[in-house]
Image: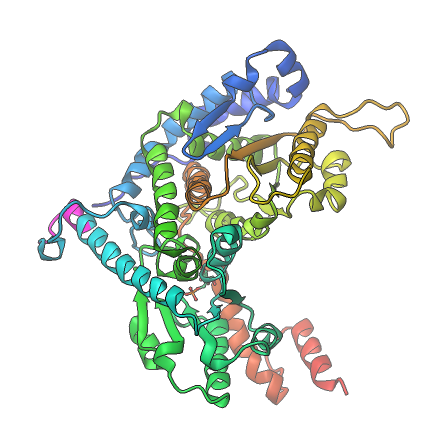
């Protein structure tokens, strides 16, 4: 079914009404005044969603602006777009693909036999895909359980990059407390041989399992690392590739050609940065086991259902995505800082960076027309409290306003006295300081305040709550991309550099700089002339 055209944000009346609001009162909005005027502000601007409590009250927004943002979503057809995704329509129109990562976390069909269904409608097709999802999930989790029970395997090495690395790496660390003892997890992504070499030097072939994770099974970095890992394995006397290598890919044929017979597949309707719920999540499944991985999926599914069914004003991904639009397009903020106050969420900012910036870092709309407004902000961050001692200076007193997204967890997983209270006190204090600021006539000690932040709070960091948090982030990226009228599910922007690297690589051998631009030619000669 053809995806109906939707108006882009700036083609709606609500967009221009928001522009007027910004000019008349929005740019002078002051959080301190807003709290003084409305004792209910915290309640009005906070909400619970599955596994996540969100305080949005320290954002530069009032009820009227929020209502206009909901109107913007309505006028852009965000709900219809969301429903089109959930109905399996090919909303990734530049690649003619459906976007079904949410299907990976949907419960198993109540009855079997979908394999026999005639795929003559979208509903049947989705049911068929769901049955395939569960067949693969069951096989992958059975394999994960076998690896968990295999004491001879002590080290699991995931070889993959981008979405085939960032998600699993982030989640395995985040769920460290749920991880099976006696196994170590390593992640090798960079083509820089230092990374693989540093891992291999501590390993033995008989106790190592390599997972070659690549949606396409063509990515140069991953193929290079996989080949080197296999050479190392054989040089060290390893022989049983079937036992020590598994591939996680949509391109099972290429994995077999590479010599890997243990394979777990997935589908082209899963974008790389949305793939940790698929076979790409195998390291997570080995770490936390069958039940843990199913909880992880269930947490995400709960958030999917929230996004799919909650009314606009109680729909957390929608509210966050619309705030992102307000900040980017009306207040002109170009960046968002992620501050996870939990060291196990150390890799969350890097994961969110790909999720947001690869999805929404686009300069043309669905029709290929250049956009007259900004899209993806720069997403970055470090765990608190470390960031406080590095770049929070700029957040408090710099010339740019950067909205901060705090992520905190109420219950710690350790029993070290005093630490968690101090950690949480710091998170609250930073959000408070950003908002309240401090008057000082002298200037250098003056904090302007009125700097916005969102506070996301989990009760505990568990597979389910992590799943929900990540699905929340996926859907908020969907919402802003939808208002911007872009395709959040392709990534053509990564291709040019790959092509040029293939051209340059042999030149580093031959020294031929014919046809190169002056700078690249100069650097090539410099590299070749070092003694
Ligand atoms: O180069 C970008 C990208 O295609 C990402 O979208 C993807 O997550 C990553 O490369 C890895 O791709 P693959 O899983 O196919 O190796």
The reply, left or right, for residue 139 in relation to residue 507 is left
For ligand 1, give the image quadrant. bottom left
Residue 307: x %, y % from top left: 36, 34
The residue lying toward the viewer, choosing from 497 and 315, is 315
The image's colour scheme reads: rainbow
Quarter holding residue 73: top left
Residue 23 is situated, as x and y percent measured from the top left of the image, at 60, 21
Q: Position of residue 167 (x, y in %)?
A: 47, 55
Q: Is residue 503 above or below residue 383?
A: below
Question: Is 284 included in the stretch rendered in magenta?
Answer: no
- Horizontal relation, residue 67 to residue 522: left or right: left
**Residue 175 placement (x, y as % from top left):** 49, 51
Q: Is residue 524 above or below residue 18?
A: below
Q: Quadrant of residue 414?
A: top right
Q: Residue at x 37, y 46 (%)?
A: 295
Q: Residue furthest right?
A: 442
At 50% from the left edge and 34% from the top edge, which residue is drawn? 459
Count of numbered marks:
0
| Of 292 and 249, the residue lying toward us | 292
Q: Is residue 85 visible?
A: yes
Could you say which is closer to the camera, residue 163 or residue 95? 163
Q: Quadrant of residue 6?
A: top left
* Quarter of the figure that contains the C terminus: bottom right
Residue in the picture at 39% in, 70% down: 150
Quadrant where the N terminus lies?
A: top left
Residue 30 can be seen in this image: no
Q: Is 46 situated above or below 124? A: above
Q: Is residue 123 magenta?
A: yes
**Span colored in magenta:** 118-125
Q: In this rendering, is residue 156 above or below 10?
A: below
């Amino acid at each position: 079914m053809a995806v109906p055209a939707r108006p882009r944000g700036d083609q709606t009346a609500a967009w221009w009404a928001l522009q007027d609001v910004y000019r008349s009162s929005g740019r002078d909005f002051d959080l301190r005044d807003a709290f003084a005027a409305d004792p209910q502000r915290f309640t009005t601007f906070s909400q619970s969603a599955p596994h996540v409590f969100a305080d949005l009250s320290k954002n530069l927004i009032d009820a009227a602006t929020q209502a206009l943002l909901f109107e913007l979503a309505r006028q852009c057809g965000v709900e219809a777009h969301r429903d089109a995704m959930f109905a399996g329509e090919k909303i990734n129109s530049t690649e003619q693909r459906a976007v079904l990562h949410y299907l990976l976390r949907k419960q198993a069909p109540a009855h079997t036999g979908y394999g026999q269904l005639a795929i003559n409608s979208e509903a049947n097709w989705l049911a068929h895909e769901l049955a395939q999802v569960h067949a693969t999930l069951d096989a992958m989790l059975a394999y994960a359980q076998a690896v968990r029970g295999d004491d001879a395997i002590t080290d699991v090495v995931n070889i993959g990059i981008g979405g085939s690395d960032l998600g699993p790496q982030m989640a395995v660390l985040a769920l460290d407390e749920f991880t099976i003892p006696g196994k170590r997890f390593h992640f090798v992504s960079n083509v820089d041989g230092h990374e693989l070499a540093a891992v291999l030097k501590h390993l033995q072939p008989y106790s190592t399992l390599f997972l070659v994770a690549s949606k396409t099974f063509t990515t140069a970095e991953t193929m290079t690392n996989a080949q080197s890992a296999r050479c190392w394995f054989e040089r060290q006397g390893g022989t049983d590739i079937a036992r020590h290598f598994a591939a996680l890919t949509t391109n099972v044929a290429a994995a077999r050609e590479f010599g890997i017979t243990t394979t777990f597949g997935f589908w082209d309707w899963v974008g790389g940065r949305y793939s940790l719920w698929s076979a790409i999540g195998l390291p997570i499944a080995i770490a936390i086991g069958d039940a843990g991985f199913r909880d992880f999926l269930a947490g995400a599914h709960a958030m999917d259902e929230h996004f799919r069914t909650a009314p606009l004003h109680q729909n957390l991904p929608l509210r966050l995505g619309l705030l992102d639009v307000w900040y980017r397009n009306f207040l002109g903020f170009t960046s968002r800082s992620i501050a996870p106050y939990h060291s196990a969420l150390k890799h969350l900012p890097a994961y969110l960076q790909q999720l947001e910036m690869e999805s929404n870092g686009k300069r043309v709309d669905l029709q290929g027309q250049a956009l007259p407004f900004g899209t993806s902000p720069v997403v970055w961050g470090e765990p608190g409290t470390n960031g406080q001692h590095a770049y929070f200076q700029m957040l408090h007193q710099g010339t740019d306003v950067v909205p901060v997204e705090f992520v905190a967890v109420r219950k710690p997983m350790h029993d070290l006295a005093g630490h968690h209270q101090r950690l949480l006190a710091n998170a609250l204090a930073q959000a408070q300081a950003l908002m309240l600021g401090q008057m000082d006539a002298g200037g250098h000690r003056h904090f302007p305040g009125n700097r916005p932040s969102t506070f996301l709070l989990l009760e505990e960091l568990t597979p389910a709550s992590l799943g929900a948090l990540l699905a929340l982030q996926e859907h908020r990226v969907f919402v802003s991309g939808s208002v911007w009228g872009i395709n959040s599910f392709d990534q053509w922007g990564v291709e040019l550099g790959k092509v040029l690297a293939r051209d340059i690589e042999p030149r580093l051998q031959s020294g031929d700089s014919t046809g190169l631009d002056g700078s690249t030619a100069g650097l090539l000669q410099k590299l070749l002339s070092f003694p």
